[in-house]
Image: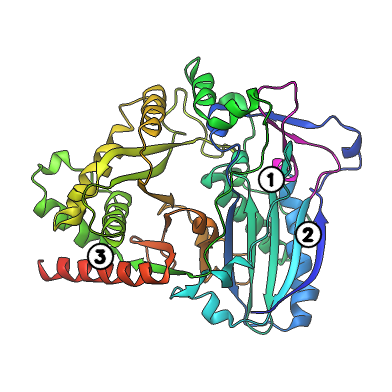
Amino acid sequence: MALKIIKISRISPATDSSRDSVDPLVLPLTFFDLRWVRSHPTQQVIFYKLFKSSREFFYSVILPRLEFSLSLVLHHYIPYAGHLTWDLQNPKPHIVVFGHDTVSLTVAESDADFLFISSKGLRPQSELRVLVPELSVSCDSTSLYSLQITLFPNQGFCIGLAEHHVVKDGVGSIMFIKSWAHICKLLGHRTLTLPCLPKDLTPILDRTLINVPPGLESKIMQSMWYFSDEKDGKRTLRPPPTGDVSNDLVRITLQLTQEKVKNLKEQAKRESARSLHDLYLSTFVVTTAYLWSCLVKTRGDSEERPVLFMYAADFRNRLDPPVPERYFGNCVFPIGCFGYKAKPFLGRDGFIKAVEILGDSVKSLGSQGIKTLCELYIDGTKQVKPGTQVDSVSGSNRTGVYGSDFGWGKPVNHELVSIDRYTAFTISERRDEIGGAEIGLCLKKSEMDTFLSLFNYGLDIIVSRI
């Protein structure tokens, strides 16, 4: 696939002329931000099919509207224009936004087959990698957001983005995309006034809303190795090296219909030795449990190898007082299912075992406070052995990303590209059905073949037992 860079521009948040003279906006990092200081950027791509898709229409109508609405929405989401900085005199980094700060926007063209690249079938991961930008990173400063809009002439376009996890979680990420789409679509209505954001899309930046027990922040800092490096004069914001991304990676978007999810829940009820009262069978639990059990089987028959599963829990409604849903920052914390070996997952009951483990974990979030969960996470990570199979899930089946209509229709597909850096899969709502889930997965071709065989065979067996 040939990619041609058309231009690289800087988009300033819309504001009045006094912006350059005001003091910079400084946002301290909260307890929930600290875990992500040296994380690799989250990279996503959203595909839009165009029915009126000539180059002239794209460059004269679509692109100017996207750029103008981006400037307008950045006025509300001003942290995206800033940088994460780490001054020598400060024990932890902070986010700072100056009046002249901007967001990088790359405009490109591709000669690839849009229908293939934006499909949900098997595709080379390398075909999607070129559609997302990178962040600018140094030892003491990193940008927080960058964008790439790629035109597929006479077919469609996609929006690729790279964002630093330290500035927001998945809730904030999707809220920004929805807000941008909302303003862009309203610009097409030719009204005399500039569009505004509704209350449910207007972000709250107040970091004092995060209330955790005293001493918890110092505990998480002591547990993160990059804060220990700082004491030895090795301070850096660069993400740790992960090696080159394999050229043999392929990705797929799997569809679990509402009926298939129901079948998974019924199997768990039927085959678990527990009572129905003791099972927690949400769509998230049964979907991730099924994927986890398939991934463990995919990696081979070694029964004694350690396995670990991670997911991020949202604490907006779990803190006292609760944090508003519109809070733009991190309010998620990683939860680990530690201390397991592969053996229970390799047999016929592997899915049931995974359901019970994940269900217990999710159910306990309501009774265990953030202090206990943080201590369990710190203790669990200390016990992880070399060679552990670590699998994880990103996203939620309630994100609403497919509602992001910029004025030319809702997306045809959405992919979290950056799961190729670690063993993870994504979960989101389905585009055309209420209920069910979409699963994004990226593996080496040989592993993907094995996984798909296990995944499809397992679903067929479940249906045959109904």
Tell me the magenta residue range: 77-102
Amino acid type assigned to the residue bearing label 3 in the image: Lys
Calculate the distance from the C-alpha at mark 3 to the C-alpha at mark 1.
Answer: 39 Å
Q: Residue at x 63, y 45 (%)?
A: 164
Residue extending furthest toward the top:
214
Amino acid type assigned to the residue bearing label 1 in the image: Leu
Query: Residue 246 magenta-drawn?
Result: no
The earlier-in-sequence mark between 1 and 2 is 2
User: At which x and y percent is residue 73?
Assistant: 71, 50
Q: Nearer the viewer, mark 1 or mark 2?
A: 1
Please state if 453 lies on the left or on the right of 132 as rendered: left
Mark number displayed over residue 144: 1
Q: Quadrant of residue 450?
A: bottom left
The earlier-in-sequence mark between 3 and 1 is 1
Residue receiving disc 3: 260
Please state if 303 lies on the left or on the right of 440 as rendered: left
Are there few (<14), some (14-19), or many (20+) residues within 10 Å of tag 3?
Answer: some
